Image: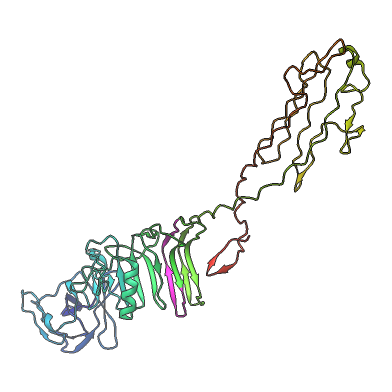
Amino acid sequence: MRHCVLVAALGGVVSWMSLGCGGTQSVDDAATGQDAAVDATTMPDGSHDATPGDATTALDASDDASAGDASASTDAGADASTDAGADASSDSGSSDAGPMGCASGRYDLNGLPGDGCEFELGADAIYVSANDIAAVDEVGCGVGPVGTLAGAYPCRSIGFGLAEADRTLRTRVLVAAGLYAETVSLVNGVRVLGGHHPTTWERDVAANVSTVRPLPSAGHTRAVVAQDITLPTSFEGFTVHGVNATTSSANSYAIWIRDASSQLALRDNYIVAANGADGDPGAPGAEGSDGVDGQPGERAIQTASITNCQGASNVPGNQPLCFDAAGELSNASCGAGGVRTCGAVLVSGGAGAGAVCPTDNTAQGSGAMGSQALGGGAAGAGGDGGHDRVASQCVVFNTGGFSAHGSMGGAGTPGASVPGGAGGGSTAGPVAGEWRGAA
């Protein structure tokens, strides 16, 4: 902040007062009649540095200029004079000073008197604020915050701010704290800096959180896109949230980079990933092969009495005999189920029931239910056994209206659909435009 300085010699103490104007002042020392060039630069402790010629003179900011002892004149591109007991005046029309005595391009946005005109307007910057009620996305936005240039206001979205930076050949987009529900596509050669206070535009990434979180959309989702970057470009000081993908097999990217050189820099960002979408269901499997025929059942036992039947050598459990495929009696696994495997899984049928000695028109036991394959359908029920009759004399065989032959077992139901395969477990999937999980 520059000042016009009025200096008077008061018994060896140099006293001063400041006016709002720019430039280096020529000060007439009333005691010596010598000219002194004074660079009125505000120091961090509130004092000023004044340079008369080659020497440096510290000016006491607690003293006021005394018109009773001496008078001083200043030349700041226009004459400014003070009379005894009168206020100092300046020709502001010939000064480049900003508001409230600020130098050109500097402004007091935080309202704190201690730091003067703390804000410097960036001539290479576009300003963006989602929470400023004056912010509008239109051509001409973003050249400065409200309270700087006449009619200046921020852009509302980062995307429009980047478009304005590209249009006006500016190289920075400064983003205030707030939520930006958009996909940000970086522009080659433009730095995007988050973490600014929406009023003072002081930058503190931890205190002023600038968040990018797009709305859900179809297809692959991206929060930040960096593509074809060849010039110094950066994205700094943001919290970035990915968005869950909803389209089948779509990816979710928080930051998507393609064909970017080492000129791209990502710094001080907090990135939260989201979920990709599930893949399409797999096609139904082909029908399995029919089961293998079971072994023939045990032959009937003919005896004169149930006692003789139970004592016969070939009664079920003693020495069963079965008719083989050629129709010959053989010592085989009577009534065994057909044997088949599906891959490494056993899908054989269940064994049929064995013969028992009859009691009058008593039916033989039904065949057993076949075994069920892993993940397959229910096994078919066993067929009913045939009926026999016990007679104490030689009579024409009569089954009492029942079948003498056992019925066939029921067919098993089709196998159930199995769950889909697990998702790809490798991060080293191929990339052809978009990432695909390893098969």
Q: Position of residue 138 (x, y in %)?
A: 25, 71
Q: Position of residue 52 (x, y in %)?
A: 25, 85
- In this view, which residue lies farthest toward the top? 392
- Viewed as shown, does residue 401 lie left or right of 84? right
- Viewed as shown, does residue 73 lie left or right of 363? left
Is 174 situated above or below 372? below
Q: Which residues lie in the magenta part? A: 227-243
Name the residue at 43% across, 69% down.
235
Indicate whether residue 235 is drawn in magenta: yes
Look at the image and tell me in which quarter the C terminus lies. Answer: bottom right
Q: Nearer the viewer, residue 232 or 282?
A: 282
- Scheme by which the image is coloured: rainbow
Indicate whether residue 155 is drawn in magenta: no
Q: Would residue 44 be visible to someone looking at this image?
A: no
- Viewed as shown, does residue 252 lie left or right of 327? left
- Viewed as shown, does residue 117 lie left or right of 196? left
Look at the image and tell me in which quarter the N terminus lies. Answer: bottom left
Is 359 situated above or below 216? above
Name the residue at 76% across, 24% down.
385
Q: Nearer the viewer, residue 356 or 92?
A: 356
Q: Would residue 63 be visible to someone looking at this image?
A: yes
Which quarter of the figure has residue 10?
Answer: bottom left
Name the residue at 44% across, 68% down.
225
Q: Position of residue 145 (x, y in %)?
A: 25, 69
